[in-house]
Each structure stands twice: as C-alpha cells, then as structure tokens.
Image (cartoon, helix red, strand yellow):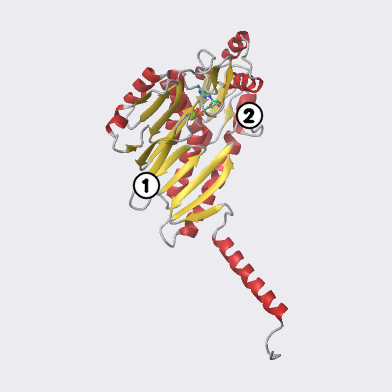
Amino acid sequence: MPDRLPPLHRVIAALVGLVLLVALGSRARSPDPDTVRIGSVIRSARPVMGTLLEISIWAPTGSEPAAADAALQALLEVTALEKRISSWDSQSKTSEINLAAGAEAVAVGPALEELVSDSLDWARRTEGAFDFTGGPLFELWEQAREKEALPAESEIRARLQLVGYEKVQLRNGTIRLTVPGMKIGFGAVGKGFAADRVAQSLRSSGFPDFIIDVGGDLVIGGKRGDTPWNIAIRHPRRGSHLATIATTDCAITTSGDYERYFTVDDVRYSHIIDPRSGWPARGLTSVTVIAPRGIDADALTTAISVMGVDAGLNLVESIPDVEALMVEEDGSMHLSTGLQMAKGFLTRLQ
Ligand code: AMP
Ligand code: MG
C-alpha cells in the first residue's frame, strides 16, 4: 500500500465527522426531534393537557422546514396556554381564580377571558347541561371512579350548592366566583380551545392546510393537496371505525362513555356528569359534533351527552353549520339533518 494514503483511523475520523455534520445539519433544519415527514405531510406531536397533541401540516415541496418551525411554534404556544388555564396546575390563573372563590375578582389575560366568555355562552345556551363550574361535582365522581363506589346522595347535594355558571362574574377582564368553594375547570372544552389556538397559529405562519388532533378532538384546515382530508370516527364500543368523513375547514369532536367510566351493579357511570342532577349522564354512548370551531364542537359533545337525543338534536338543528351523530346504549344511531343529506360524504357507516 502506498504510504501517501491516510492511515485508517484518519479515514474513520473524517467519516464520523461527515456523518455528524450531516446529522447536525438536518437537526438544525428540523428543530423538533418529534417532527417526522410522511410524503407531503409534516407531523409533530407532543404531550399536552394529559393527552397527545398531534399536528399534521400539508407542506408543499420546499416548505417543509418552515412547516416544522410553524408546528413547533404552535406547540410552544399551547404549552404556555396550558400553564395558564389548567386547573391541575396550582400556579395557573384558573387555580388563582378558584382559590379566590367567595372573595376577590382576579384579573385575567385575553385567552382566559375568551375561554370563560365562550364557556359562559355555552352554559347559557345549553341551560347548564354544559357547565364549567361543575368542578366540585366532577371531583366527587372522579373519587367515586377510583373507589368504584357511588358517592352518598347527601354529598352530591352538598356539592350541587357550589355549582352554577350564573354564580360567575366576568367583568372588564376580571373573573370572580361568588360562592366560597366554587371551582371552574375546562376539562370539557380545553382541548377544543387549544386546537383552535393551534389552527390560528398555523394559519398566521402561512400554513392553512392541516389536521390538529388533541386527544381525538380535531380541527381541520384546508385540504390535503387537491383533496379534502379524510377523517375516521371511531366506534364507541367496537374499536373499529364508525364512519369516515371527507371534509375541509371544520372541527370534529367525539365524547363518549367509552373513554372513562366505572361500573357498579352492572350500571355504567360515565365521566360526563349532569350538573343539574349531580349524577352521570345516561343513554348516549357516543356523541360526535361537527362545528366551525373546536371549542363549540367540544362544548356541544359534552352538553349533548347530558341532554340526550331529542333535546340534543333540537339544539343542533337550531345552530347553523353544526351537525351531530349520536349513538345510544342500544346501538341505535341518530344523525342531524345536514349529515343525513351528506350521506355521500359518510362512507362505511355501520
Ligand atoms: P369531554 O370528554 O369533552 O366530554 O369532557 C369531559 C370532562 O369535562 C370530564 O372529565 C369533566 O372534567 C368535565 N365535565 C363532565 N361533565 C361536564 C359537564 N356536564 N359540563 C362541563 N364539563 C363537564
Ligand atoms: Mg367536550
């Protein structure tokens, strides 16, 4: 071997250096290690709000690095939002409001003001079937689920005294809970609200084509290239898909008793509670709502689970651009008029 060739260890060192450079270079272009590219779709995921937030962006060729940056930016915004609105985080504004219940009003930022304002609106429109002040009651039923034993009726009655959206004052950017012991929380709308915020963020970054999935609550923007996005709705009991919907620009949310429940004497108790009676909702196994915004779809799925088929359908039919699909415990299915007419879009309906 001619001695002009570099020794083997130098060749290896150079190769390792080259590989590292390539790796660092691609890392720099793709800032989030959880970002992957599937064809023309850039997908990023991160745990938020006790679930997984997944962002899929349709990125035309050449825009992939910018799409990955846009996804990361949106994920960071949602993480910051969660810190402010979560009732589980003792440092959040929501916890500050709950601690001040019965005492002073708390000044809040625009995001929380909007969330409370929208939540009050849905509480009024559903006559309290959706009620974000149900915290004391929901906690009681969480404990019941852990113990797999029903709470005492006297305890339910005591907690009901602390529930009621009409006991919330929202004034000039401040929120006050008027009764000591009251607790607000956004378990039923936080995911939809967060998805709306992600959608806003992606659009303002110049990416209007996306699917945002916050633990099954979807906000859909634009198209997948030339075709609408195809969305699968899961079957509440069978684990398979109930239907697929081809759609653009809307939110789709499903609530159901298959997610979190417990059973006592063969009766299934849902994690969705009727804030008026204090008892878990009965009758509907799954409710899917399609609406323009995530927060609306999310509030409505929870509310309709409480209201039942007839009142739920009446409400949906009275709101433009909102559709619903409901499945009862016996498996019977109900579609709002718009979905019945759009049966061509609903395939594999079982
Ligand atoms: P979702 O899965 O969107 O229906 O939200 C369910 C969660 O919202 C529960 O885990 C409770 O924390 C809370 N919740 C239960 N029932 C209601 C209700 N009637 N109104 C508002 N929030 C509720
Ligand atoms: Mg909901």
Please tell me which of labels 2 and 1 falls first in the chain. Answer: 2
Residue 335 on image: x %, y %? 34, 27
Residue denoted by label 1: 222
| Tag shown at residue 16 | none
**Residue 117 in view, yes or no:** no
Q: Amino acid at mark 2?
A: Glu
Q: Residue at x 45, y 39 (%)?
A: 218
Residue in the foreground of this view, choosing between 62 and 254: 254
Residue 16 on image: x %, y %? 66, 71
Residue denoted by label 2: 96
Q: Residue at x 58, y 42 (%)?
A: 47
SS under mark 1: loop
Q: Amino acid at mark 1?
A: Gly
State yes or no: discs 2 and 1 in contact (Cβ < 8 Å). Answer: no
Tag in front: 2 or 1? 1
Residue 313 on image: x %, y %? 35, 22
**Residue 276 in view, yes or no:** yes
Q: Residue at x 38, y 33 (%)?
A: 291
Quarter the N terminus occupies = bottom right
Q: Is residue 107 left or right of residue 200?
A: right
